[in-house]
Image (tube, rainbow, N blue to C red):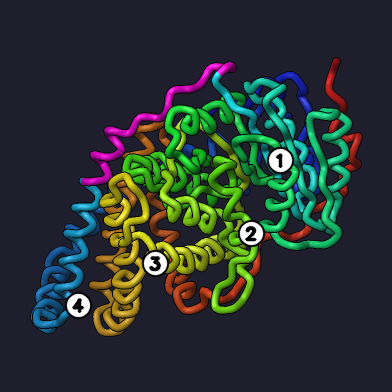
Amino acid sequence: MKTKTSLFKFLEFFRHKKNGSSAPSLLSPLSFPSPSGLSEETSNRSVKGLIIGLLAALPLVYGFFWGDYLEMLEIFVYHRETSWSVDVIRISVWIALAALVWRVYLVYTYRPAAACTDQELPLCSVIVPAYNEGAQVLYTLRSVAASDYPVEKLQIITVDDGSKDDTWRWMKQAERELGDRVELIRLAENSGKRRALYEGFQRSRGDILVTIDSDSEVDASTLRHLVSPFVRDPMVGGVAGNVRVLNTAAGIIPKMLDVGFTFSFDFIRASQSRVNTVMTTPGALSAYRRSVVAPVLKQWLHQTFLGRPANIGEDRALTNLILKNGYHVHFAKKAFVYTEVPTAYMGLAKMFLRWARSNVRETIVMAGFIFKRFRRTPALGARINLLLHLHRMTIGEILKIWSLGVIVFYPTLFLLNMFTGAILFSMIPGLFYLYRHKDSNFLWAIPYSLFWLIGLSWISLYALFTPHRTGWLTRDLKDQATPLLAAVPQKSK
């Protein structure tokens, strides 16, 4: 992972954690002792050793049950050989393999836009909306202020969306530290992230509008890399940043998600960028060309779904509007942002459910224009990506329902196949992570795949039947036990 910005090294402040206790300095990694009293590094090595041991034991286990497995498989094929489901599975596997090969080629040929010089960079407005974010909003604003971007060309705006905690006090602390470099907006009541962003857009002056979540931090070079594609290509209307996990030291879930995020951005979005159609600009870090989004902001703000106001999925909704109007959306590989992710199952499930519902809604919207002549440049790759997406969202979910019947009549065969499939599937993001980072953390892809299969695979199916439901689901009040000024000293002069 990239090192943090020079400002963090200079300040040497202590982070106020959610449990109210002082956390280690940002100069050193967070420490969470294991139940046995082992250090985090020793604990990680132990878990990774266990993963390797389980992988090594798999051939022995399968060898022991191989005869019985073949017999069960023969019985299953005999009873199901004329079933539509077997043919659908075969076709789906071939589609997945073809899609993988195509995307590997796209990723291999992907090149990020060259970074602009100070003279080339346009005026940029950064909007940071916050709701019940507590102290983290200060660290976010500090990281933006530490950017390697000309000060005279950078406007920083933060919006308190009617928080019920001490978020506003932390924003005022940022104002004391950064002076007139940061502009504060306070909404009287909670109106949703979309409204908060809109208010920030209305106050902005930049040619490029950047949105950053208040639970995220950026590198010094992030803004430069994020904005450069707009200068290099006038057809670019939106750019997606490269999201990594900030709190990897907080537990196993963040470690697993960091592997998943690497695959989702460095592989999936890089391949989508090659066909000029990144499907989602992430809330954690995105940029938009003002002249492209300004005409559609009212439509975006008042978007509805099934007659109800759409208060989730504002990032993909804005991406759809940009694409629909004929502009490209790219991915900036070197524009890193580090975001906090849930550390417990319930928080993770709620986050994924919100994303899944937004995915259903905006996929329907995208299907309404993607097969028309919506832009002058080629759009075949965009259409292929949507068809693959629709296949996974429909056939994939039907096969999930079908598998419930299989597990009743062939439980052993089903569990063996699902376990094997999960292990094999995890090799794709795992090996890609290893290729990108040359890091043993790629092993977290294996437990993540099993964890997804057992604990998260239901979410997309449930979202398919409940896309009309709204709500953030993940914004709870944070602990406010640590005094404001004691926890965050002023910068040295």
Secondary element at image label 3: loop
Q: Nearer the viewer, mark 4 or mark 2?
A: 2
Q: Nearer the viewer, residue 418 or 114?
A: 114
Would you say the residues marked 2 and 1 are in contact, meaning their CB atoms lie under 8 Å apart? no
The verdict on residue 107 being magenta is yes
Badge 2: few (under 14), some or many (20 or more) residues near its Cα, within 10 Å? few
Would you say the residues marked 4 and 3 are in contact, meaning their CB atoms lie under 8 Å apart? no
**Counting residues from the N terminus, which is met first, the one under dot 4 or under dot 3?**
4
For the residues marked 3 and 1, what is the alpha-carbon distance in whole angstroms? Answer: 31 Å
Does residue 256 appear anywhere in the picture? yes
Residue under pointer 1: 204
* Residue stretch in magenta: 102-119
Give the numbered dot on residue 85.
4
Residue under pointer 3: 368
For the residues marked 2 and 3, what is the alpha-carbon distance in whole angstroms? Answer: 20 Å
Q: Nearer the viewer, residue 424 or 207?
A: 207
For the residues marked 4 and 2, what is the alpha-carbon distance in whole angstroms? Answer: 45 Å
Q: Nearer the viewer, mark 2 or mark 3?
A: 2
**Counting residues from the N terminus, which is met first, the one under dot 3 or under dot 1?**
1
Badge 3: few (under 14), some or many (20 or more) residues near its Cα, within 10 Å? few
Badge 4: few (under 14), some or many (20 or more) residues near its Cα, within 10 Å? some
**Counting residues from the N terminus, which is met first, the one under dot 1 or under dot 4?**
4
Residue drawn at 60 percent across, 68 percent down? 310
Query: Please, what is the three-letter code of the amino acid marked with disc 1?
Result: Ser
Give the numbered dot on residue 298.
2
